[in-house]
């Protein structure tokens, strides 16, 4: 049984991380040839595959935001304010990853515009996690903390091989997704603490839905459904425990367990898992 007496004492106040993309990765940035030459075999191709997914998933934030704004009257003022800041961050991530993808793969920005415009976004497959502000916030916590560990691993496996600018993009992604996770937690504690006893079952439902989807429906949430073969089998169990712990309802998982989410698999194995993913889909 979840302990529900741990209540927040502070009011939510959206604070986005202030970093200027042009200062971190200028649009005209080019990666020096020696980084490509010294990168482990196969790594560039795998990074391109990763970016071909992550870049557009970040851009899908606009679709989710537009959908939620159609239901704006259902939501609290602090939630709507948080969403505006969140969208600004996610669109910055989209542009940061477009630049990264361009630098690594040579795919043009025009081609990326075309690819994004051709995407089909479906809300209906995930609508059971979008019931109300509370379930949206819990889904956001689940999704954002998953992104923290996923980007942390990607930073170690990919971003760090292509110079300080690309590495810093990865670092900012990790930091921002962590902030989004925390902002959602603070709103839950401030506005929905009477529903904390629903958290555990809801998180399990979100995780089950992600597994059953088998694919990503291009509406931002549950985008890890497209990459779940890259993650260790206990990934969702551990991040669910992190969410519950952040809300003060359980203790955090062991540090070694957390580390296993982003240090578990080396480049060779991840290359194999990419192959598995391609053959599966
Ligand atoms: Fe993001
Ligand atoms: Fe985020």
Image (cartoon, rainbow, N blue to C red):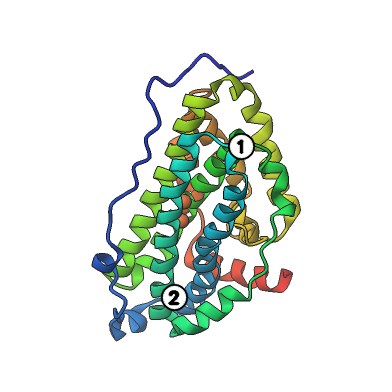
**Residue positioned 68% across, 37% down in the render:** 204
Q: Is residue 242 above or below residue 272?
A: above
Badge 1 or badge 2: first in the primary sequence: 1
**In this image, 70 relative to 9: left or right?**
right
**Can you name the residue that lies furthest to the top here?**
5
Is the CB of mark 2 within 8 Å of ligand 1? Answer: no
Residue at 39% across, 43% down: 179
Q: Position of residue 226 (x, y in %)?
A: 64, 61
Which quadrant holds the C terminus? bottom right
For the residue with label 1, is its CB less than 8 Å from the closest atom of ligand 2? Answer: no
Q: Quadrant of residue 108?
A: bottom left
As drawn, which residue projects farthest toward the front?
Answer: 73
Q: Nearer the viewer, residue 272 or 75?
A: 75
For residue 211, above or below residue 37: above
Residue 265 visible in the snapshot: yes
Q: Mark 1 against mark 2, which lies toward the viewer? A: 1
Query: Quick one: label 2, few (<14), some, or many (20+) residues within 10 Å?
Result: many
- Residue placed under numbered mark 2 in the picture: 101
Can residue 252 be spotted in the picture? no
**Label 1, label 2: how far apart the Cα atoms are:** 37 Å
View extreme (left): residue: 23
Decide which of 196, 75 is in the foreground and name it.
Answer: 75
Q: Position of residue 83 (x, y in %)?
A: 48, 46
Residue that appears at 43% across and 21% down: 8
Above-or-below relation of 232 to 198: below
- 132 or 168, which is in the foreground? 132
Q: Is residue 48 left or right of residue 224?
A: left
Which residue carries the number 1 mark?
74
**Is 146 placed above or below 201 here?**
below
Q: Residues within 10 Å of mark 1 (few under 14, many from 20)?
A: few
* Mark number, residue 232: none
């Amino acid at each position: 049984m979840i302990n529900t007496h741990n209540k927040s004492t502070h009011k939510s106040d959206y604070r986005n991380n202030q970093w200027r993309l042009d200062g971190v990765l200028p649009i005209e940035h080019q990666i020096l040839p020696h980084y490509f030459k010294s990168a482990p075999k196969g790594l560039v191709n795998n990074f391109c595959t990763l970016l071909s997914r992550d870049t557009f998933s970040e851009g899908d934030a606009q679709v989710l935001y537009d959908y939620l704004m159609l239901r704006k009257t259902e939501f609290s003022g602090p939630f709507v304010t948080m969403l505006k800041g969140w969208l600004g961050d996610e669109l910055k991530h989209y542009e940061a990853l477009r630049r990264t993808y361009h630098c690594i793969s040579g795919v043009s920005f025009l081609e990326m515009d075309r690819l994004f415009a051709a995407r089909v976004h479906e809300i209906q497959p995930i609508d059971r996690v979008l019931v109300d502000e509370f379930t949206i916030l819990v889904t956001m916590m689940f999704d954002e903390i998953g992104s923290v560990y996923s980007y942390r691993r990607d930073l170690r496996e990919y971003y760090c091989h292509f110079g300080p600018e690309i590495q810093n993009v990865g670092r900012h992604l990790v930091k921002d997704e962590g902030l989004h996770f925390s902002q959602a937690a603070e709103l839950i504690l401030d506005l929905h603490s009477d529903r904390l006893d629903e958290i555990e079952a809801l998180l399990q439902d979100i995780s089950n839905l992600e597994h059953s989807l088998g694919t990503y429906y291009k509406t931002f949430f549950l985008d890890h459904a497209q990459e779940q073969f890259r993650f260790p089998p206990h990934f969702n169990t551990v991040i669910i425990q992190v969410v519950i712990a952040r809300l003060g309802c359980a203790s955090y998982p062991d540090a070694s367990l957390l580390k296993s989410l982003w240090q578990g698999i080396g480049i060779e194995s991840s290359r194999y898992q990419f192959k598995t993913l391609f053959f599966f889909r």
